[in-house]
Structure formats: structure tokens, C-alpha cells
């Protein structure tokens, strides 16, 4: 598949995380010449937190992952690519239980400490024989690097996605490294796609869960590619505690704010990478909403604009049709006043106080729309609420990819 024109030039240099070992193998879930199973082994006493899809037709992996995350401990992660194992009934559950049991026996830990994610076609049970062989191979193969692990979890992704951040907790520098996959079926109603964050920080699971939920609210829950929420969306954060910092247990602890900032930063990096790999995308779009009655209202208005096929196709066609933005604001179901509304592209205001700007010159707006990175601003004029959301344009490429997805 052709690499997205919005992709970064290279995969970032992610630091190794003490207590984390990455391996990949071929389970042959699809007829492709590549690894499709990622196995991550974690040191004992690793803390875990997770956010999961709110799609009611979620996969067994999501159900069991949600239950396990409540326990706060993790020893391993398995990610299967090419088969989502969603909407597969008891056969899907048996496959996950088999994987967890196989690894738990190897590590001599509880099955609940093994996390499993699957991504791909919905409605096809994960083949238990292939899963068993793939896990067996992964347990004995040589460790790999972050880029290989990121490539292995992908499906329709056109590039591997990774990010890193760091923070100081007292006198101790802690590191975060993360990988994510996602390209289509992206309108996260909790987290997004499949994303995994690893840190050597020592942090209590309850606090890690609070921090991840807060980071998710500012990042993954502010992106959309196509308005569809996956059955398998999962983001997990693992903290090995190997950095040796004084363990964080409360937001009042020294360094907690710094770690929260680093976690939010890495989630934002990952979220934006997913949008930059939106299926068929040619433009990355940032939508800033100000003047709403609340931050949440601003976010909903922003997502209404970001999910509008008419807005997305206008930008794909480099058409400065700001009337479509007006429409999307009005249909959001949030407080708005037509006669106070203002709209801009980049720094050029095209409408204010419910009217087109008298001196409006479309030339600089048209020039902006010819670029790869597009900025849209909307001021509601009713309050102090604000939010930023990110999306991509809608092109013929999206239709081609999804019309042939199972072929």
C-alpha cells in the first residue's frame, strides 16, 4: 500500500524501556508475507491501565482486557493483526483464553495478567491452531526493536507509528515509548485503534488509570477519520517501575504533574499520527473551536465539523466553502448563535457576526487549502469553552481501500 503523503519522514528513535521485551512472529492469520503477531513480555509487578471502546458490539479481547485492567497488574501483551476476533461468540473467547493460558503457563503467572488485542476483519473467529503456533514461535524468537513491533500490529496502516516522551520525577528521569496502529474505522469513543504505552516509571495502577483517562480525553477522544467507532479500540499503558523513582500514588506527589504532561504529550503524538495515516488522506486538518459554552460543547462542535463528509470533501477539493462549516456547527446539537458565529481558515477570517467578511479575499484561503496541513477556526461567541480536534480529508482513496478491504 502506498505510504501516506502525510507520514513523517522516518520512524522516531524510541528508547528501550527497562522491563519490556518485544518479539514478533508469523501466525499466518492472513495470506501475507509478514509477521502478524506481536508479543511483549513485562517484568513482574508491572502496573497497567486501559481505556477501551464503548462500542456495544465489542470483541472478547476488549471485554477481558477491561476486566484484567481493573486488577492493575500485567505480565504480557499479545497483539494479533489481520483478524479482529469480534462478533465471534464463544469461539472467539476460547481463542483468547487459549492464548492467555499458554503464556501464563510459560511465565507462571495468572491468565488475567495477560492482555490480548486483535485487529482486522470482523466476524471471523481467530484460528486457535494458528494462534497457538504463533505464540509458541514468539516465545522463543529473538527480541526485536520498536519499529518492527509497530509494523507488525498494523493492518491498513501505510507507515509504522511510534512516539516517545520523558519527564523528571524528583531526580530521576523516566522514559515513555509507545506504538499504535490505526488508519480507518476511527472515531474513538474512549480511546482509539490499538495503542500501547510503556514507561519505566513507578506508579500505582489507580493513579495510572486516572492519568491515562485524562490524557485520552485530550487526545484520542479528539480525533476522527471517518466517524466510525471500532469494536476493538484499546489503549493500554504499562509501567514497569524499573526507573527507581519514588512511586507515584497521588497527583499531589512531586513529579506527578510532569508525568501527566509527558503521558498526555505522547498520546497526542500518537493520535495525530493515526489521523496522518487516515485511509486515503491527503490533508491533515486541525479544527479549533473557541467561545463555546463549555469545553465539552466545543469538542462536540469540533467533531461535528470534523466528521462532516461535505466539509472533508470540500477540503480535499481545496474549495474554501465555509458554508459547510456553518452547516456542521448548526447540526451539532450544541448551543450556538448564527449571528455571533465567526469562521476562519488559517489566520484569515472569512465570516464574522453571522455574515461574510466585507473585505473577504478568497485568494489567501485558497492558497492555504493547497497545502498539506489545514487549519480551521470557529468562534461560537457564547462563552469560554474551547477545544481542538484533528481529522483528515475524504478522498476517493478512502472508498477504494474500504470497498476492497476483504479482498
Image (spheres, rainbow, N blue to C red):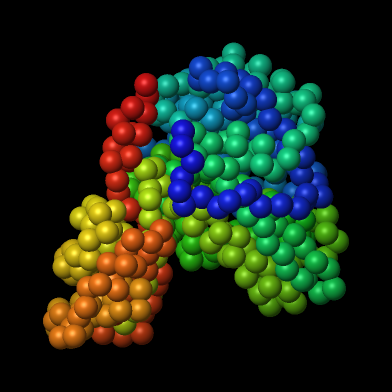
| Left or right: 322 in relation to 175 | left
Q: Position of residue 225 (x, y in %)?
A: 37, 50
Q: In the rendered view of the protein, which quadrant contains the C terminus?
A: top left
Tally of marks: 0
| Left or right: 393 in relation to 314 | right
| Left or right: 22 in relation to 65 | right
Task: Say if 353 sits above or below 302 in the image.
Answer: below
Q: Position of residue 247 (x, y in %)?
A: 78, 65
Task: Say if 164 sits above or below 78 in the image.
Answer: below
Q: Where is residue 367 in the image (x, y as percent from the top left)?
A: 32, 67
Task: Say if 212 sits above or below 52 in the image.
Answer: below
The residue drawn where x is 37% and y is 29% is 405
The residue drawn where x is 33% and y is 61% is 370
Can residue 332 be seen in the rendering of this structure? no
| Left or right: 29 in relation to 251 | left
Can residue 176 be seen in the rendering of this structure? yes
The residue drawn where x is 31% and y is 82% is 291
Q: Would you identify the image quadrant in which residue 184 lies?
A: top left
Q: Where is residue 289 in the image (x, y as percent from the top left)?
A: 34, 74
The residue drawn where x is 67% and y is 37% is 148
Pick whichever, 402 or 252, lies toward us.
402
Pick whichever, 362 or 323, lies toward us.
362
Amino acid at each position: 500500500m502506498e505510504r501516506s503523503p502525510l507520514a513523517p519522514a522516518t520512524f522516531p528513535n524510541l528508547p528501550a524501556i527497562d522491563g519490556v521485551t518485544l518479539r514478533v512472529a508469523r501466525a499466518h492469520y492472513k495470506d501475507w508475507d509478514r509477521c502478524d503477531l506481536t508479543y511483549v513480555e513485562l517484568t513482574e509487578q508491572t502496573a497497567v491501565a486501559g481505556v477501551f471502546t464503548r462500542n456495544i458490539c465489542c470483541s472478547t479481547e476488549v471485554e477481558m482486557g477491561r476486566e484484567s485492567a481493573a486488577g492493575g497488574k500485567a505480565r504480557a501483551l499479545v497483539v494479533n493483526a489481520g483478524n479482529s476476533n469480534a462478533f465471534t461468540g464463544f469461539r472467539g473467547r476460547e481463542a483468547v483464553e487459549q492464548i492467555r493460558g499458554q503464556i501464563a503457563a510459560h511465565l507462571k503467572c495468572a491468565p488475567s495478567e495477560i492482555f490480548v488485542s486483535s485487529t482486522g476483519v470482523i466476524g471471523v473467529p481467530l484460528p486457535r491452531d494458528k494462534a497457538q503456533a504463533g505464540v509458541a514461535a514468539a516465545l522463543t524468537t529473538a527480541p526485536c526493536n520498536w519499529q518492527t513491533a509497530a509494523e507488525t500490529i498494523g493492518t491498513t496502516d501505510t507507515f509504522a507509528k511510534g512516539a516517545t516522551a520523558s519527564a523528571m520525577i524528583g531526580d530521576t528521569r523516566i522514559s515513555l515509548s509507545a506504538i499504535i496502529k490505526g488508519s480507518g474505522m476511527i472515531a474513538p469513543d474512549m480511546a482509539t485503534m490499538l495503542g500501547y504505552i510503556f514507561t519505566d516509571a513507578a506508579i500505582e495502577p489507580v493513579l495510572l488509570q486516572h492519568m491515562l483517562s485524562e490524557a485520552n480525553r485530550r487526545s484520542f477522544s479528539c480525533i476522527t477519520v471517518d466517524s466510525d467507532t471500532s469494536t476493538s479500540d484499546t489503549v493500554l499503558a504499562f509501567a514497569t517501575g524499573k526507573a527507581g523513582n519514588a512511586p507515584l500514588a497521588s497527583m499531589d506527589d512531586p513529579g506527578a504533574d510532569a508525568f501527566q504532561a509527558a503521558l498526555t504529550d505522547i498520546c497526542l503524538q500518537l493520535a495525530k499520527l493515526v489521523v496522518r495515516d487516515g485511509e486515503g488522506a491527503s490533508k491533515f486538518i486541525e479544527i479549533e473551536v473557541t467561545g463555546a459554552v463549555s469545553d465539552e460543547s466545543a469538542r462536540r462542535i469540533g467533531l461535528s465539523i470534523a466528521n462532516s463528509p461535505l466539509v472533508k470533501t470540500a477540503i480535499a477539493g481545496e474549495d474554501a466553502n465555509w458554508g459547510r462549516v456553518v452547516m456542521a456547527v448548526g447540526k451539532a446539537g450544541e448551543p450556538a448563535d448564527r449571528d455571533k458565529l465567526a469562521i476562519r481558515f488559517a489566520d484569515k477570517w472569512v465570516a464574522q457576526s453571522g455574515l461574510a467578511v466585507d473585505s473577504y479575499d478568497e485568494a489567501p484561503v485558497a492558497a492555504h487549502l493547497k497545502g498539506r496541513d489545514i487549519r480551521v477556526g470557529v468562534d461560537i461567541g457564547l462563552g469560554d469553552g474551547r477545544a481542538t480536534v484533528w481529522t483528515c480529508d475524504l478522498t476517493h482513496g478512502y472508498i477504494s481501500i474500504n470497498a476492497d478491504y476483504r479482498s
